Amino acid sequence: MKALGRAAAVAAVGTMLAGCGGGPGGGGGKISDGRLVLAVLNDQSAIYADLSGKNSVEAVKMAVADYKAKYGDKAVTENIDVIAADHQNKPDIANSKAQELYDRQKADTIMDVPTSSAALAVANIAKTKKKVFIDIGAATTALTGANCNKYTFHYGYNTYMLAHGTGSTVTKDGAKNWYVVYPDYAFGQDMNKSFSTAVQGAGGKIVKSDPAPFPNDNFSTFLLKAPGLSPKPQVLGTMQAGGDLVNLVKQYNEYKLRDKGIGLAVGLMFLTDIHSLGADALAGTKFTDPWYWNADQGNRAWADKFLAKTGKRPTFAHAANYSAALQYLDAVQRAGTDKSDDVVKQLEGHKFEDVFAKNATIRAQDHLLLHDVALAQVKPSSEVKEPWDYEKILKTIPADQAFQQPDPACKL
Amino acid sequence: MILSKLAARPVLLLFGLVAAFALPWLIYPPVAMDIACWALFAAALDLLLGFTGLLSFGHAAFWGGAAYAAGLIAVHWGVPFPVAVLGGALFAAVLAVPIGYLSVRLRGIYFAMVTLAFAQMVYFVVNQWRDLTGGENGLQGVPREFFGMDLSDPFFFYYAGLPFVLLGLFAVWRIVRSPFGRVLVSIRDNPARAQALGYPVERYKLLAFVLSAGLSGLAGGLYAISHGFASLHEVYWTTSGQAVMAVVLGGIGTLWGGAIGAALIVELNDYLATAGFTETGLVTGGIFVVIVLVFRRGVWGTARDLIAARAARRSPAAGTDSAAAQVEAPDRQEVTAR
Amino acid sequence: MLEQAFNGLVGGAFFALLALGLAVIFGMLGVVNFAHGAFYMLGAFGAFVLLDSFGVNFWVALFAVPIVLGVVGVVLERLFIRRLAPLDPLYNFLFTFGLTLILQDLIKSRYGVQSQPYPRPSALSGSLDLGLFTYPTYQVFVLAVSLAVCALVWLALTRTRVGMIVRAATEKPELTRALGIDVGRWVTPVFGFGIALAGLAGVLAAPMRAVNPLMGADLIITVFAVVVIGGLGSIFGSVTAGFAIGLVSALGNLYVPALSQTLVFILMAAVLLWRPAGLFGREEALS
């Protein structure tokens, strides 16, 4: 039995290798298997489904269409497939699916992958399989820090960018004293750390920062405490996300903290969050946004196309998926092949500009996309002119200030 | 009849072994490994649910706790992976002692609630203790060390991991067949009588709980090594729920049914991930409700009944058979509500 | 400090309403309703849908939604719960677990996973001066409603014939049946009533909590712990524990934030160690 098993195993590896023909180093054409496969692996059924989900697949398809239109006959290949898988927000499914996408579906790149545990697991697979992985949906800086690798790119946003943009800009605008509430798990703790550094760096003071349970539906403990702190904080900085953020903001309004002179700044907020809370609940709140659909004519034109395809206005994650796909295809075009090592070489240090990424560079040291981001403010409903038109862009935070310095822990 | 029964067992056993060895040829190897781990998890849970009559809705604590323990051992000490897996199983068994001690004193449905609550507590602790567990980033980069051998190919790793699963399944089978297992069954069927006969019922239940947790831990530890990480999802209540679903789907108290149920559920999840159908809860919940309402003996239980019915038609004497049936036919439907 | 205590009671108001529903259902049917959290979620969504699609305000929803959900509960009991009732109670537990997955996904497929907006009713939007401190009116209202409902249920249980039967069946099931009291005809209405209470809690939650398909899932596990602490099979114990746990978690939040989520489970462990049947429970819950 044992000997049989071993012989069988060896035979199996033989078949597998044969199946991989045309992978790194092999094959006749310049494009492995004669086609380019872009796989979107994200959450289509759980908490990130609205933010990214199925419509990110549409965004990637838009990028493929635009790539074909741009290069026409000169394109390296006509055969480009976009495939998708739903990791249901479960890291173990993300892990198995990523292997399957690379091995069996011949994916040349995997994109999106929200949820940090899933993203980090897929990054590991990309490393062992030597295939490109462009993460968009996860916020953890570990992807370009301790867990970085040659084949993994982080595209769009991260916790540092969110916390730093809001923290330092709002402090410089005059709100010196902060009370910070953050959810007591890794994301929140990271956010709190980045946020405090940013506020202090800009000359502000953290009067107090409190961890809150996660998930939590009652923030009154913290909200009641805020006005009594000494010195009295001018801003409440909340690092809560999703449902917790909604709870906190509802209760912030109930306790009328804004009337008591305590403004609200949010660490992580998406267009979909504003939509669910209603503009008035958040009016005046400042936050950092990687991209806003109605910020300028170019964004708007793309958002209109997206609306025509999906019936929805795009979130930044949709635009980032579009941009990442476009840049990946462009890198393949420049390299003339889909061999991972060559494509990675083309992406590293690449400077470009597209509808999502303005003034953009893919930093060679850690594969983080640097690009201009915006400090946004939520409009009161009286100024909202059309559905999803919730944000006013206060200022642009230039690419070189928006993101962190490369983490020395990252060795590619 | 006895002859045919004697013949049927080795045939079934052989069939199961062939299936276990052939699995990564038929199914994508990492998924095959998931099936193997979940099969052991379900069988270990059935030891408690089917043979002791206790519904634990908190076994994610043991599966996930062992996943983290095995992962931490592998990450920090770089020991060969079998040591890490066994370490995880041991951790789960130890964790089960206080939880079991407090839970086994409660009657059936309360037991389910309390184990669920304890598992949620474990979840919160794992989530909060990020220095150790990595919080919601998960514990990443768990190595598969085995004396310098390269086990990175999931196909090979399946065969490296399979002995643990088979060992675990064998242990469950041995426990069920042992005198200890018979006492458990008698406790399940009539606790008062078992008590009257002088068995320390609670201590038996506790031991069953610890054994079940340890074997679940064996599965969970292997799962973490095979995926190369442990995440919060492993200790979340939905994982406990999925294990219970696997047992019910396969057939409560059928032992091997759990393994079949686990295989079906893992395959279903894998299929749904690329099916483009996003209402996964609707599918799994729907199947589960149908099973509970009309199909309570589960897939394997029903199949076995059909086989038995056919055999009975051929030889009418079969109905009165045997000592084994006493152990194996826990028709829980006959246990009434209070 | 006093404000925190008040906060805790408001949180406890939800625990109490949910625990009360669980306890009466358990008492009459011997069923632990896993889907109780899902019905709480449906209550909140009911209020949201009425307002969003039909412009029906909070006050109407406060009555209409629990009634509709109560009817749903009655149908559910007639069609399914009843069928499984003669079997081991764990089958109904498993059935309601599957039902939870289905209900969550049904709502998710229609409304997505994002939280839905629900404004506070305008009459309750300000804050009240309670003498020692000011407090949001809506929260005071929630606490008052919860206390009133619990008190009314208690009165009904102690002063009416139906209540006596329910209470007797809940607290001394064997004796009640032995006395030849016909418990059966009250089973369906009581189930519907328990579901209606969960729906009521959901409507009350809509203006102050995030309304999304998963809002009940984690809450129900905490409520299980509350019921275990209060005493298995004790209606009074469940309600009391509901408020007490709310209070203790709020204070825990204040003094030991690191423990705030585990506190209720640690308390549960301590109670099980000291009084395995819970604070107000009876020994028959034990094996």
Image (cartoon, coloured by chain):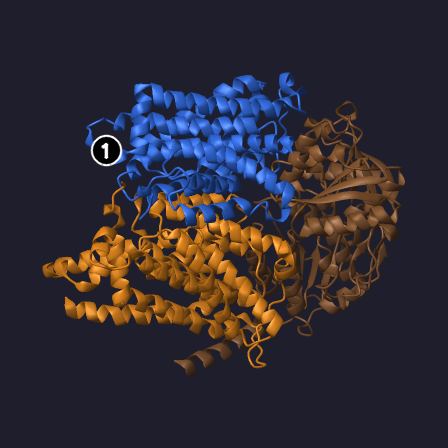
Q: Is residue A218 above or below residue A188?
A: above
Q: Position of residue A252 (x, y in %)?
A: 70, 31
Q: Position of residue C223 (x, y in %)?
A: 48, 39
User: What residue is shown with label 1?
Assistant: C175
In the picture, which chain is brown? A
Q: Is residue C281 left or right of residue C44?
A: left
In the picture, which chain is blue? C
Q: Is residue B320 left or right of residue C48?
A: left
Q: Position of residue C210 (x, y in %)?
A: 61, 34
Q: Quadrant of the N terminus of chain A?
A: bottom left
Q: Position of residue A339 (x, y in %)?
A: 72, 68
Residue lying at 21% horizontally and 63% vertically, measured from the top left: B324
Q: Secondary structure at mark 1?
A: helix
Callout 1, which amino acid? Answer: Leu
Task: Examine the rendering and report whether any part of residue A273 can be seen.
Answer: yes
Q: Is residue A304 left or right of residue C186?
A: right
Q: Colour of chain B?
A: orange
Q: Work out whether residue A167 or residue A317 is closer to the camera in this orientation and state it.
A: A167
Residue lying at 82% horizontally and 55% vertically, measured from the top left: A404
Q: Is residue B203 left or right of residue A231?
A: left
